[in-house]
Image (cartoon, coloured by chain):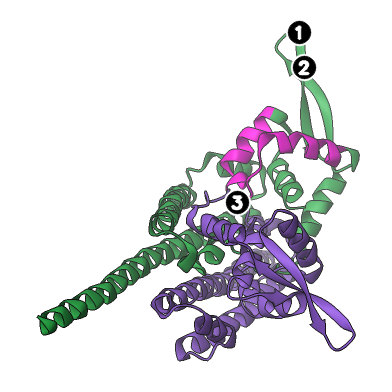
Chain colours: A purple, B green
Amino acid sequence: MNLRFALLAALSAKPRTGYDLIAVFDRSVGNVWHAEHPQIYPELRRMESDGLIVAREVPRGPNSTKREYRLTDDGLAELRLQASTPVEPGHERDPYRLKAAYLEYADPKGAQDQFRLHLEHFTKLADHYEQILVTLHEGTDSVLNERLELMPPEQHERIVASRILSYEGLLARAEMELKWARKGLKVLDELAQSELDATDGVVDLSGADDQGRQ
Amino acid sequence: MNLRFALLAALSAKPRTGYDLIAVFDRSVGNVWHAEHPQIYPELRRMESDGLIVAREVPRGPNSTKREYRLTDDGLAELRLQASTPVEPGHERDPYRLKAAYLEYADPKGAQDQFRLHLEHFTKLADHYEQILVTLHEGTDSVLNERLELMPPEQHERIVASRILSYEGLLARAEMELKWARKGLKVLDELAQSELDATDGVVDLSGADDQGRQ
């Protein structure tokens, strides 16, 4: 249902060929809802058979054609319906916090690598979202600008504000993850130090004991 | 794989009957990785046939028995392996930010309801995580205490620190979601006001125009 919503949204600005749709998808809504390209065509066919989009053949060069998809009235109604229907938040299924909850079973290297990978991943994502937010604020996001040109001016403010709100949310999550992964690395260091101190304590005592007996 | 890890973790303190396991699961690791009860028994059977756990019949009252599951050496090794193997972070698939990115297609009520539901959901979760964190810090979490009694003292610090790190992460995410949902409601209010002002402006101008012609 989320992929369908994402595709309806990507087609809502104007009709697009599959190739064009996928290029736009990857540069816009695919940042929020990733889809592998082989997932997209079957979903488009299902949407077509459900009457949400129609395809027509348009020329590609002198001797060939390509399919161009456009939203039907039913498709636009479905997009509006999904956009207006609150989604009940799902149950917690958090793979990162699950792993972190049982660090006593992890070897020290594996646990560190997990947090470092986490840091690396969300650093990249945060940078990516920040760049997108700059283009959204500056008015230089080409996918957004193409849409704004086709939409009535009275909708522009809402369109831009929605995109910014969405990417601000993604950025806030990435920043939360970065902070948490840094804390995870700190906790691992502190545990290692504390466990080393405990071992040193035992060695020291035994050394003192040996000396006492000499 | 995550459910399997969660069940291995839940069984790692001591052998448990299915009933006991599910009760403990819901009060501990199920907070991080939710599973419906009908999912749990089939996974236990798969883990049994994979040699990760064994079941034995233990008495239930005078005339009946129940199955008690315990981790095998292979099961403990699998738990350690999974705990030590970093998970590559997945692609972004964020249903909340997806919806928020296209507010121009939502009716005002539906959009507001979405953010309010979000607030309500993550307020409850944040409260729940805060309560658990209090019991973890105070040493009054009964599931954790049962485990600590069975585990060597030199592991206690790591065990407690892991649980706290995990719930702190869940709490940080819930707080991020709350902040974002509040921002969402604020953005909706501002958009409504701005769009109202624009309409008022048109009305005023047309009024002025009418007056000018009178």
Q: Secondary structure at mark 3?
A: loop
The chain holding disc 3 is B
For the point 79% across and 36% down, the residue is B42
Q: Looking at the image, is mark 3 or mark 2 nearer the viewer?
A: 3
Chain ID for label 2? B
> Is residue B164 something one can see in this rendering?
no
**Quarter of the rendering containing residue A20:** bottom right
Q: Position of residue B164 (x, y in %)?
A: 53, 57
Residue B63 is tagged as 1
At label 1, the amino acid type is: Asn
Where residue B178 sits in the image (x, y, percent)? Answer: 42, 61
Q: Amino acid at mark 2?
A: Thr
Question: Which segment is the magenta one?
Answer: B19-48
- Residue lying farthest to the top in this orientation: B63
Label 1 is found on which chain of the structure?
B
Residue labelled with disc 2: B65
Query: Can you see residue B82?
Result: yes
Q: Nearer the viewer, residue B204 or B126?
A: B204
Which secondary structure type mostly characterizes the magenta part of the structure?
Answer: helix
Q: Residue at x 73, y 8 (%)?
A: B62
Instruction: Please name the amino acid that badge 3 sits on.
Output: Val
Q: Residue at x 47, y 59 (%)?
A: B174
Where's residue B102, x and y in %? Answer: 51, 68
Is B120 magenta? The answer is: no
**Viewer-side residue, A7 vs B190:** A7
Residue B167 left/right relative to A23: left
Name the residue tied to disc 3: B32
Q: State the residue in front, A193 or A165.
A: A165
Q: Is residue B102 above or below residue A75?
A: below
Q: CA distance from mark 3 to mark 2?
A: 31 Å
